[in-house]
Image (tube, rainbow, N blue to C red):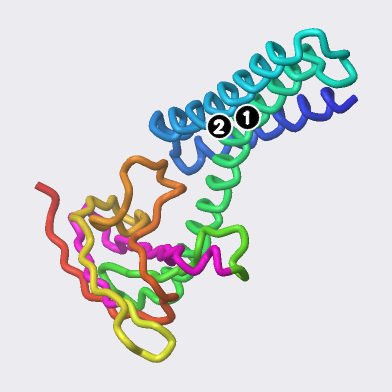
């Protein structure tokens, strides 16, 4: 029964992933670099557990199975490493993609509400840490990832560049960054990309830039030109 439920969940998420990827023109799977990292992590656990199992098997060759059962350990290793690979290749990227699409929808709503006949609209969406335990000291060294979006409100494609001055809750400047030159189609909304934006990760895992403290407000200017 658990296998049937798991297969059903995978099938449903497969369909949903296909729909989201087609609707928002996103890649179905994470990129090659992230997949290689996932394989390395799963392979590292496989290697460590295999060495432990073989070593214990040699040292306790005649031990009863109640003390050491090599077959059970091999089965546990296979299930454990497969689970890690499944989570890092499928579950986590799917959740990240869904979160990114939710960001897109929020950013589009905010952009439409504040555009006020501007040619280009800059939207600040969130400043947060990617840390599972934000209440502990383990997360103090983790920087805040800041997501800004830019929308082309014109009826023709434009090459756009944005400069953002990020500030904290007290109004102190945290960082001033300049985006790369981005080509935006008419009405297109996309993440503001800077030199800090990682190209190794999939688009749904990226942020515009990082700061040591949370961004609470910002100032922005933009410039644009016709696409060559």
Q: Nearer the viewer, residue 78 or 175?
A: 78
Which mark is drawn over residue 89? 2
Helix, strand, or loop for circle 2?
A: helix
Q: Is residue 155 magenta?
A: yes
Helix, strand, or loop for circle 1?
A: helix
Residue at the far left in the pictured view: 228
Q: Quadrant of residue 177?
A: bottom left
Residue pictured at 76% horizontal, 24% vertical = 7
Where, quadrant-wise, is the N terminus in this rendering?
A: top right
- Distance from Cα at disc 1 to Cα at disc 2: 5 Å
Q: Is residue 89 above or below residue 190?
A: above
What's the magenta region? Answer: 137-165
Q: Position of residue 113 (x, y in %)?
A: 45, 74
Q: Position of residue 66 (x, y in %)?
A: 90, 19
Residue pictured at 56% horizontal, 69% vertical = 137
Residue at numbered disc 1: 86
Label 1 crowd bin: few (<14), some (14–19), many (20+), radius 10 Å: some
Residue pictured at 63% horizontal, 32% vertical = 84
Q: Is residue 78 above or below residue 124?
A: above
Q: Is residue 6 magenta?
A: no
Residues marked 1 and 2 touching at CB (< 8 Å) = yes
Q: Nearer the viewer, residue 139 or 33?
A: 139
Q: Position of residue 103 (x, y in %)?
A: 51, 59
């Amino acid at each position: 029964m658990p296998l049937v439920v798991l297969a059903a969940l995978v099938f449903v998420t497969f369909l949903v992933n296909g729909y989201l990827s087609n609707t928002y023109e996103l890649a179905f799977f994470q990129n090659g670099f992230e997949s290689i990292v996932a394989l390395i992590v799963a392979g590292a656990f496989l290697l460590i557990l295999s060495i432990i199992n073989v070593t214990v098997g040699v040292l306790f060759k005649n031990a009863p199975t109640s003390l050491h059962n090599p077959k059970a350990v091999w089965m546990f290793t296979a299930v454990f490493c497969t689970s890690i690979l499944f989570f890092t290749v499928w579950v986590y990227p799917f959740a990240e993609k869904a979160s990114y699409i939710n960001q897109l929808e929020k950013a589009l709503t905010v952009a439409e509400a504040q555009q006020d006949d501007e040619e280009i609209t800059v939207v600040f969406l969130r400043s947060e840490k990617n840390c599972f335990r934000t209440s502990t000291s383990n997360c103090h060294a983790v920087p805040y990832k800041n997501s800004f979006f830019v929308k082309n409100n014109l009826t023709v494609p434009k090459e756009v560049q944005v400069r953002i001055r990020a500030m904290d809750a007290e109004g102190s400047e945290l960082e001033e960054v300049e985006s790369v030159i981005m080509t935006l189609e008419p009405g297109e909304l996309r993440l503001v990309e800077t030199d800090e934006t990682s190209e190794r990760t999939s688009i749904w895992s990226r942020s515009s830039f990082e700061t040591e403290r949370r961004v609470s407000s910002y100032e922005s200017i933009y410039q644009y030109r016709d696409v060559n």
